[in-house]
Image (cartoon, rainbow, N blue to C red):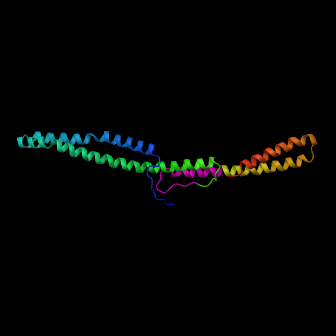
Amino acid sequence: MWYKRSTYLINPKFQLKLSLFVSSLVLLISLVYPFTIYELFRNLALQNSSPTAIQTFTNNKMQLILVLCLYQLCFILVVFVICVFQAHKIAGPMFKLQRYLNQIAEGGSIQKISFRSGDHFTEIAEAINNALEHLKNNQIKDFSYLSEVSAYIRNLSLVVPDDKKAVLNEILVKLDEIQDRFKPI
């Protein structure tokens, strides 16, 4: 199913924190490049030993550093934006999963969950669907058995003395409450 993504900051705390962490890491690692390039040009100018080459380099060194820093800044901004989009593919499924589980906890109906194509952790939706299907099958078996037990107790209450019928009726009431409270998923 295809959904239009209109909000990219679903979990801003997570997404921005992850993006800032990755961008900072990339910045720290890539700080080597501008300084390496600057040193390379400086060494080339010094090796040339031409006074005009040295003077040209000296005059242009701040411009060179500025250009290299601007390139670096642009690169970090691109990394940051890419991280926000990638984090969205993580935050989206987690947001949907949290909303889904809250809905179940509030008594909502249990249906299959699915994530958008392109999102990460689609295997989580499949695992949850399989787990709920397993629980549903077990619950159906348990309710079938509870129905048999209720029928057996009702039949038993016909032949037991009157003083024991109250206990059996109490057990039947509790079994009915359990069945009403935990209807099959």
Q: Is residue 18 left or right of residue 67?
A: right
Q: Is residue 174 magenta?
A: no
Count of marks overlaid on the render: 0
Where does residue 69 sit, x and y in percent of width and height? Answer: 24, 44
Point out residue 100 in the picture as x, y percentages from the top left corner. 58, 50
Q: Residue at x 62, y 49 (%)?
A: 104
| Residue lying furthest bottom | 1
Q: Is residue 142 in view from this perspective?
A: no
Quarter of the view holding residue 18: top left
Is 60 left or right of 99, judged from the image as shown? left
For the point 41% across and 51% down, which residue is it?
A: 85
Residue sitting at 47 percent across and 49 percent down?
Answer: 10
In the rendered structure, the answer to whether residue 65 lies left or right of residue 18 reads left
Which range of residues does the magenta coloring cover?
Answer: 113-134
Where residue 161 appears, x then y in whole percent?
94, 42
Judging depth in this view, the residue of 95 and 26 nearest the camera is: 95
Q: Position of residue 160 (x, y in %)?
A: 92, 44
